[in-house]
Image (tube, rainbow, N blue to C red):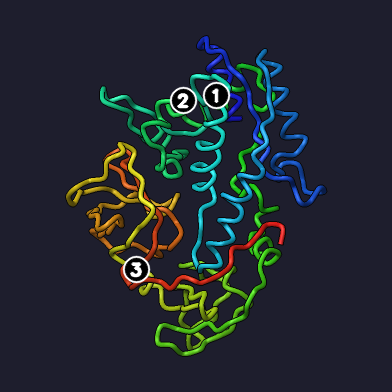
Amino acid sequence: MDSSTTAALLVRQGYEVIGVTMRLWTPENADAPPRRRRCSPQEIEDARTVCHALGIPHQILDFEREFTSSVVDYFCQEYLRGRTPNPCLACNEQVKFGALLTKALALGVDYLATGHYCRIVSNGQGHELWQARDEGKDQSYVLYMLGQEELSRLLFPLGEYTKEQSRQMAAEMGLPTAAKRDSADICFVRQGHYRSFLAERFPQRPGDIVDSSGRIVGRHEGIGGYTVGQRRGLPARGGREPLYVLSVDPLTSTVIAGSEDELLSDALWAEKLSFVSGEAPRRPLAVEAKIRYRSQAAPALLTLHDGRAEVRFERPQRAITPGQAVVFYQGQKVLGGGIIAESAGGRLPLARANPCSDRA
């Protein structure tokens, strides 16, 4: 619905628009319900129908190889390292605003437009990335890696509207996708069963669940089923106190668990940094930092050390998770972000694992 509305708005504004469907992932389960399947014949037909209704051409571009290597394999490799990845980050950086943008420019277009909810603001010297008007649908967190070159070639028309307004416009313009449901699942994992997806791609190694003092409190069937902050699948300490995942050690296939209080940390380190302006701050900077997509931005001090970011929060944050992104804001403006490597509790070990293959 969002992409359809974006195309219709641009046609209405006088742009010459080409509709593109990316073929990213061949569904493994042909019997899966259509609403759960991406790149399915029904999805492609929906896009084609919208383009026909708008009187614009429609193309299918195959990025399955790029998606497999940059997103699916990355997703598996991060879990092998005991981390919890956000595949949307890799897809946006490597596929949508990497391979697709490159292909679009090669076709001679001026802009790539998507249905993301965020805004591009020109400041007279360059481009800034801002949160969407609709805070509840804002997607700037997963776009922090966009720089000046990308922003100069992108359009996000829905950033000025709420989701309800976008759906209403789609209905008023008679778009056949106006009532189509949103999908919040990982697009290449059938029906949200990511643990099964991982188990099919690399052998699960059973191991111990230990508490923060090192005492064995249980067993697990594989680290892929555990992420920082998780309660499910853990025993209660002493039969009474709930335990939560504090960290995962892939080298020994150990899950470390503790109390909810032990999940609190007031600092983190991040790597693979990216800043929208193209320039990293040269001195400590007060920011608001988000440690996951649905979390609230919290006041923090950002300091860079040899290409890594130290982020110290005014108040402790719950379940800082390696593999997730930390994104830096000043008000509604996105400064940049990076991938969380460790919390203040000490650096988490990384596995010396072989990359997995989606075809393994």
Q: CA distance from mark 3 to mark 1?
A: 41 Å
- Using a 10 Å C-alpha cutoff, classify the residue at mark 2 as few (fewer than 14 neighbours), some (14 to 19) or many (20 or more): some
Q: Amino acid at mark 2?
A: Leu
State the residue at coordinates (72%, 24%): 48
Under circle 3, the secondary element is strand
Q: Are marks 2 and 1 in contact (CB under 8 Å)?
A: yes
- Sequence-wise, the earlier of marks 3 and 1 is 1
Q: Nearer the viewer, mark 3 or mark 1?
A: 1
Q: Amino acid at mark 1?
A: Thr
User: Which residue in the protein does label 2 denote?
Assistant: 155
State the residue at coordinates (62%, 43%): 183
User: Which residue in the protein does label 1 denote?
Assistant: 6
Q: Are marks 3 and 1 in contact (CB under 8 Å)?
A: no
User: Which residue in the protein does label 3 denote?
Assistant: 264
State the residue at coordinates (33%, 28%): 127
User: Residue 307 bears which disc, if any?
Assistant: none
- Sequence-wise, the earlier of marks 2 and 1 is 1
Q: Nearer the viewer, residue 14 or 211?
A: 14
Location of residue 74 (image quadrant)? bottom right
Location of residue 160 (image quadrant)? top left
Looking at the figure, which quarter contains the C terminus? Answer: bottom right
